[in-house]
Image: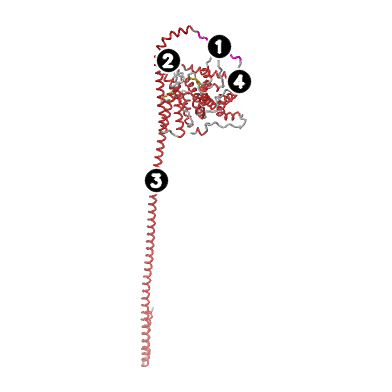
Amino acid sequence: MLTMQGNDDRSFLEMDQEVLQAVLPSKVTEVEGCIRMYEEMHRLKGKEELRQRQEQQEQMVRAVYDLASEQLKRFDELKELKQHQEFQDLQEVMEKSSKEAQGQQEKLKEEHRHRAKVLNLKLREAEQQRQRQEELERLRKEEGQERLRRLYSIQEEVLQLNQQIDPNYRHKDLPRIDLSAYSNRGNQICGLVSGLIRTTSERGFPTQVDVANTERALQEMRGLISSMQQEIAAAVEEKRKRDEEEERQKQQELLKKEQMKAQTPAPAQQSGGKKQKEGLQVKAEESTMQWYQQLQDAAEQCIASFSGLSNCKDNNEVKKIKTELQKAATIPVSQISRIAGSQLREIFDKINNLLSGKSVQSGGRTVSVTQHPQGLDFVYYKLAEKFVNQGEEEVASHRDAAFPIAVVASGIWELHPRVGDLFLAHLHKKCPYSVPFYPALKEGTSMEEYQRMLGYQVKDSKVEEQDHFLKRMSGMIRLYAAIIQLRWPYINKQGAHPHGLNNGWRWLAQMLNMEPLADVTATLLFDFLEVCGNALMKQYQECLQKKEIPLPKGALQPSFWRA
């Protein structure tokens, strides 16, 4: 801008000079022109100086501007550099933080992996420990079950051996030989084995000590059989040695017998007797006696129906069938216990299958009543006899055993009524008070025979002790009282009980109406009511004082059948 103004001033000066030269040719004009020229030159000089100063000023301004611009650029560069450094520092901090966080995360991951590894190791160890425990438990159960099967096998063999001992054995050449001691010890061994099995089953599985104890009992039973056979053999040999001497005396004895005539005077009749109490009977009702006789006749007919099987001596195959059928019928009854309902059901099914003509396993052999035409009648008879024997022996010793035996017997009775009739026949014969029936002493009957008719055991003219007699009678009455109130739970119960509580009420009424027998009447009434009183009260509601009779000890609860 200042440069353009200077150019204009020079143009004006040149124009003035041209004018002055033309207008003032004179001196004055020259002086004036010089003055003006001087002034003009001075003015122009001032302008030039001003212009220069302006140019210098502009240069300075430009220099300052350029410097300021450069400084601003440097400031911007410094600012940008600072921002870049701050950003880089921030980025480094963030990267450092990220690396630290990543490192921490990796550390946490590593710790987690380590903890997971330790936990997995512990879980694996725990699983292995659990598997080892399960394996040990499985092995323990298998060993326990194997030992239990061994116990049952030993029990079966002991029972089979015990059946070889007949307390009423009479050898044709040795009428006086007495095997009662062997029979008693055999029964004791059977009871010992049964008690061991019952005790071990209640606490779980048997131990090796239990197996050893039962094996010792088995060895003792085998030794007992061996001793009995040796005694019989020795007695037979001794008898043989006496035969020659007896033969020499035989003719003389025959001569003496021919000369003597035996006379049996009639026993004196009593003209009078003890006066009965008013209203009490000494004889059973006629209908009851007819029923009793019908059952005894049916039992005799059953015996006759399998005479070909029982009396066979020459045919070894038939004898083998007879032995196996007897074992198949009696051994399961001996194994009845209160261990578990499932085991009781297995025993029931085995007996029912045998009576239904199906094949069953017994002693490692397959047995069926179809093996012989008379097999079913034989099994009916022996099974009913075994149930009564269990009452006489097992229930007499362990009162709560009446209920598991009774529920099986009741179920078999319901499905196979003939077993029930034979059971009653055996029961009435061994325990006439279960009719109730008091056998009378008839003319010509010996006192020993009469004692047997009353239910006593007589050996060598020696009658058993009263306590033992009452114990056996109580066992049979308890079993009978349990049977009339129980039914097998897995049978359709639409029909009536084959021999229900009405028979118990009949027995109770007739027993109370008969002349009481010392010890017997009170004992059997107590046992009967203790077992059956609660069931009778629920049905007939005639309890006068407490209005209730407690459940009998040992009654089977619903939980038993779920075991």
Residue 173's disc number: 2
Q: Are marks 1 and 4 in contact (CB under 8 Å)?
A: no
Q: Secondary structure at mark 4?
A: loop
Q: Is residue 450 left or right of residue 25?
A: right
Instruction: Check residue 266 for magenta coloring.
Output: yes
Instruction: State the CA–CA distance, disc 1 to disc 2.
Output: 33 Å
Task: Give SS at disc 2.
Answer: loop
In the image, residue 515 lies at what x, y percent? Answer: 59, 22
* First along the sequence among labels 3 and 4: 3
Of the numbered discs 3 and 1, the one sitting upstream in the chain is: 3
Q: Which mark is residue 122?
A: 3
Q: Earlier in the sequence, mark 4 or mark 2?
A: 2
Q: Earlier in the sequence, mark 1 or mark 4?
A: 1
Question: Which residue occupies the foreground of this view, 231 or 492?
Answer: 231
Choose mark 3 or mark 1, whichever is in front: 1
Q: Earlier in the sequence, mark 2 or mark 3?
A: 3
- Are there few (<14), some (14-19), or many (20+) residues within 10 Å of tag 1? few
Closer to the chain start, of discs 1 and 2, is 2
Where disc 1 sits, the SS reads loop
What's the residue type where badge 2 is placed?
A: Asp
Tell me which amino acid carries mark 3. Answer: Lys
